[in-house]
Amino acid sequence: MVSCGRCGGRAEVRPEGRPLCGRCFTELYERRVGETVRRYGMFARGDRVAVAISGGKDSASLLFSLRRLFPDLPMAALHLNVGIPGYSEECEREARRLAEMVGVDLILYDTRRELGISTPDFSRTPYRRRICSPCSTVKRYLLNRLAWERGFTKLATGHNLDDVAEALFSLYLHGDVGQLVRLRPLSPSPHPKLLARVKPLWGVTEEESRIYAELNGLPFKRDPCPLSAGSRSRERKAVLGEVEGRIRGFRRTLVSSHLRSFLPLLEGRVEAPPLLECSSCGMPSSTDPCAFCRRVEMARRASARRPSGE
């Protein structure tokens, strides 16, 4: 029998090669999340937190752990149904089950019903080979707007260490310093209509979130989005996974170096673009019309061209 590296009991999991029992792993995971929240001052007195849940393991672990760590913090869950046949219905079902299990209100938004579009509509646009891009734009905008309209003060997302490392890899590769300076565990609000965003899972890996969700019996959709196959993001994560296999701790070191060394150099030297209000929707943006309104209009035109019966 392999023993837990912390308490000596029977080991059940091996995150990053370290044998741990379920109880010790759960305590370790929650301690890392709690430390991240406290270190970066993510929550303050009077905050009302909207937690974005996709139906996947990361956001399930995020909501469950925050509820356990901060039981008195007012929070609710936000879920977007983006109309991917079969997949989105399953994600919504798991989101409903999770919110009921955790005991928080669930705010649902269906893009087909509310906007007249769904993510597959972008397959008929110039984004057809990189459909994740407009889908992400739409989701970012809607999560912020829904939370802002309902009086929340913070928006929490389930971005994990792997997500952050992949984003850093991409941004450094393309020299996008404008986005690099914004990549941080807590992104302050630059405008009254833009909520501060927090990433409490900044210090835990995707694999750790999967283990935590399974150990705690959380409902989540296991299969990845069918439209993300072949995406650049998944390819970059695969590359980083290969590097991690050769250099243990590579992703954690990359993220730590960004925060400790590079971000302080970028701050104060890279100015954020001035914000104006979109003439169509009234939300803040660096362009007019904003990226969301342009993408939605593009998808609507594509949907209108869809042959009847599809």
Image (cartoon, rainbow, N blue to C red):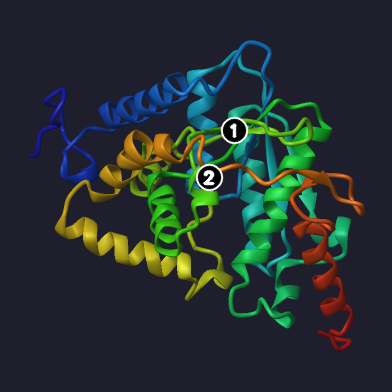
| Horizontal side, residue 27 vs residue 7: left or right | right
Q: Is residue 32 above or below residue 240?
A: above
Residue drawn at the location 72% of the way across and 57% of the way down = 138
Residue drawn at the location 23% of the way across and 56% of the way down = 244
Residue with the mark numbered 1: 101
For marks 1 and 2, give the CA distance. 9 Å
Residue ranking furthest to the front: 269
Q: Is residue 170 above or below residue 14?
A: below
Query: What is the three-letter code of the residue carrying label 2?
Result: Pro
How far across and down, in percent of the image, does residue 83 sit? 73, 64
Quarter of the rendering occupied by the N terminus: top left
How far across and down, in percent of the image, does residue 204 sit? 36, 39
Residue drawn at the location 92% of the way across and 54% of the way down = 280
Q: Is residue 287 above or below residue 254?
A: below
| Horizontal side, residue 225 vs residue 166: left or right | right
Residue ranking furthest to the top: 45
How far across and down, in percent of the image, does residue 214 sit? 40, 43
Quarter of the rendering occupied by the C terminus: bottom right
Mark 2 element type: loop
Label 1–label 2 contact, CB within 8 A: yes
Label 2 environment density (alpha carbons within 10 Å; few <14, some 14–19, many ≥20) = many
Q: Earlier in the sequence, mark 1 or mark 2?
A: 1
The answer to which image quadrant residue 263 occupies is: top left
How far across and down, in percent of the image, does residue 15 sit? 24, 43
The answer to which image quadrant residue 121 occupies is: bottom right
Residue ranking furthest to the left: 1
| Horizontal side, residue 75 vs residue 239: left or right | right
Q: Which one is in front, 10 or 26?
A: 26
Query: What is the three-letter code of the residue carrying label 1?
Result: Met
Q: Which mark is residue 219?
A: 2
Q: Which one is in front, 158 or 76?
A: 158
